């Protein structure tokens, strides 16, 4: 588990120098440790090394880890595909959701967010390349969905998220990242304020930071390979 501490230190250093190179020194990029298919012990080791934001894709697996690590004060982010009959535990247990891509999901999360908690932070997942196997709203549908989210009192629209096609070399995703940033800025100019751009993973987070990312989602570069079949 000491490997996790070293890997985290290296990621932090790489994030800082990517910010520097982009003349963004002093700006903050949230490092999200994507802990899907990693054990609760691995999450705890990262927490011991100072990591506070964790992301999960699979609900049952996430809930089990949350129960075990309830005393740590972790900020939990949901980054998986959302089925509409599974929104309640997401609304009740998570702090952030990056994968809202349709009105029905937004309305259900709003209705199911407990009054005792602050509004749920949500990001709109944008499917930029029109990949049918991936979730996400088409770029042309983002404005309508954003306007609907802004009207929900139990949601806070935080920003946009993308999961572009796997690219080699990773720099070739720059165009998607820049396009997501332009979309955020365009919506901002039309009165829909939001800050976050959730973009960049283990292979391409430095490119994403050069393009304005405010939140990188890093799994394997922190925890190593995922275990097939879950924890
Ligand atoms: C798994 C996953 C990641 C992390 O991927 P790595 O390549 O392991 O860094 C990031 N974002 C989402 C949505 C994921 O599902």
Image (spheres, grey):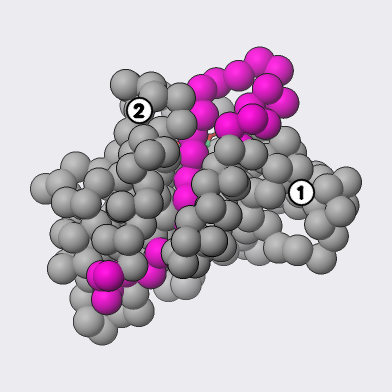
Identify the disc placed on residue 182. Answer: none
Viewer-side residue, 175 vs 6: 175
Query: In the image, 89: left or right of 75?
Result: left
Q: Single out the mark in the foreground, 1 or 2.
A: 2
Q: Secondary structure at mark 1?
A: helix
Quadrant containing the N terminus is top right
Where in the figure is residue 138, as x and y percent of width and height? 36, 35
| Residue 155 covered by magenta stretch | yes
Determine which residue is flagged by label 1: 15
Q: Quadrant of residue 130?
A: top left
Determine which residue is flagged by label 2: 134
Q: Quadrant of residue 101?
A: top left
Q: Residues within 10 Å of mark 2 (few under 14, many from 20)?
A: some
Tell me the residue at 52%/61% (across/down): 188
Viewer-side residue, 192 vs 50: 192
Residue with the most extreme bottom position = 116
Is residue 116 in sight in this rendering?
yes
Residue range of the region highlighted in magenta in the rendering: 151-177
């Amino acid at each position: 588990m000491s490997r996790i501490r070293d890997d985290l230190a290296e990621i932090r250093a790489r994030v800082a120098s990517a910010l520097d190179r982009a003349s963004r020194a002093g700006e903050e990029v949230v490092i999200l440790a994507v802990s899907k298919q990693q054990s609760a012990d691995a999450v705890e080791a990262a927490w011991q090394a100072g990591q506070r934001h964790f992301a999960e894709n699979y609900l049952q697996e996430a809930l089990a880890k949350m129960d075990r690590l309830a005393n740590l004060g972790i900020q939990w982010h949901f980054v998986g595909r959302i089925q509409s009959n599974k929104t309640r535990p997401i609304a009740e247990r998570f702090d952030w959701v990056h994968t809202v891509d349709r009105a029905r999901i937004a309305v259900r999360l709003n209705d199911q967010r407990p009054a005792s908690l602050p509004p749920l932070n949500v990001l709109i997942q944008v499917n930029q390349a029109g990949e049918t196997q991936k979730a996400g709203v088409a770029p042309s549908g983002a404005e309508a969905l954003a306007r609907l989210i802004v009207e929900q009192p139990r949601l806070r629209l935080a920003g946009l998220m993308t999961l572009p096609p796997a690219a080699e070399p990773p720099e070739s995703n720059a165009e998607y990242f820049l396009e997501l940033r332009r979309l955020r800025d365009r919506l901002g100019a039309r009165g829909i304020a939001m800050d976050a751009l959730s973009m960049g993973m283990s292979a391409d987070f430095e490119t994403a930071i050069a393009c304005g990312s405010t939140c990188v989602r890093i799994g394997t570069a922190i925890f190593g390979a995922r275990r097939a079949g879950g924890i």
